[in-house]
Amino acid sequence: MASRTDTKTRILDAAEKLFAERGFSETSLRLITSKAEVNLASVNYHFGSKKELIRAVLARYLDVFMPSAAIEIKRIHHAPEDASLNEIFSALIKPLLELNKVRNGGTIIFLQLLGRGYIESQGHLRWFITTHYGEYLATFVQAVSASAPHIPAAEMFWRLHFTLGTIVFTMASADALNEIASADYGEHNDIEAILRKVIPYMAAGVAVPVLTN
């Protein structure tokens, strides 16, 4: 059993790194098995297909992040007044940072993987996330919508995806941005500091009134 678990973990670790660096489409099972030092039969045995492997890689993070994020959002949203968008987005910081306990650098890796899923139009991932984590997603969307009731549902759909794109790009470029900030402005930021910088920007963007012709 220990050997079987070790093999599965090696496959997940190798796939995760390659997916984050190269993307899902550009990463072949042969490349994954080579990096994990296992044979193709092992991937088929543990996961059945590349799609299932992609989902399993993300599930390691989603299983930790989604319940924790929902708890934090419910905690602030049950206050006497509806939480602000800034407070709702800030409530995600702790759950995101907890992903570093899953893997070293887990916060950035998770966001990179999530970004890959949208950039590469991995439709099966949308199905997987909404099917397995729909209740948690609904908690977040309901809280955001309640805090910005002037934004129509269709417009909110776009703004939340713009928000995801902003955070994914920021985290994917974190090292480069930190180097520039350090050289040009003498700033030294960790991941939490960067998250706290981007949240007011995202909250303001989601809440800005819709322009009418």
Image: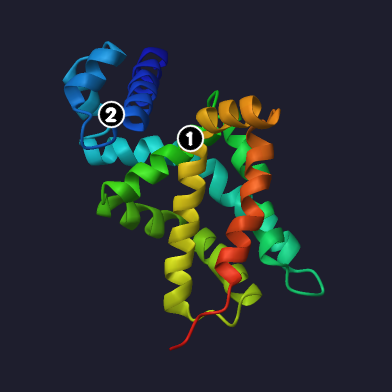
Point 67% across, 38% down: residue: 192
Query: Which residue is nearer to you in this view: 42 or 177?
Result: 177
Graded by Cα atoms within 10 Å as few (under 14), some (14 to 19) or many (20 or more), the crowding at tag 1 reads few
Point 54% across, 50% down: residue: 66
Is 12 situated above or below 85? Answer: above
Q: State the residue position of label 2.
A: 46
| Type of amino acid under label 1 | Ser
Counting from the top left corner in percent of width and height, residue 30 is at: 17, 21
| Type of amino acid under label 2 | His
Task: Please tell me the numbered disc located at residue 26.
Answer: none
Graded by Cα atoms within 10 Å as few (under 14), some (14 to 19) or many (20 or more), the crowding at tag 2 reads some
Point 42% across, 67% down: residue: 158
Q: State the residue position of label 1.
A: 173
Counting from the top left corner in percent of width and height, residue 79 is at: 79, 69
Q: Secondary structure at mark 1?
A: loop
User: Can residue 71 be seen in the rendering of this structure?
Assistant: no
Q: Secondary structure at mark 2?
A: helix
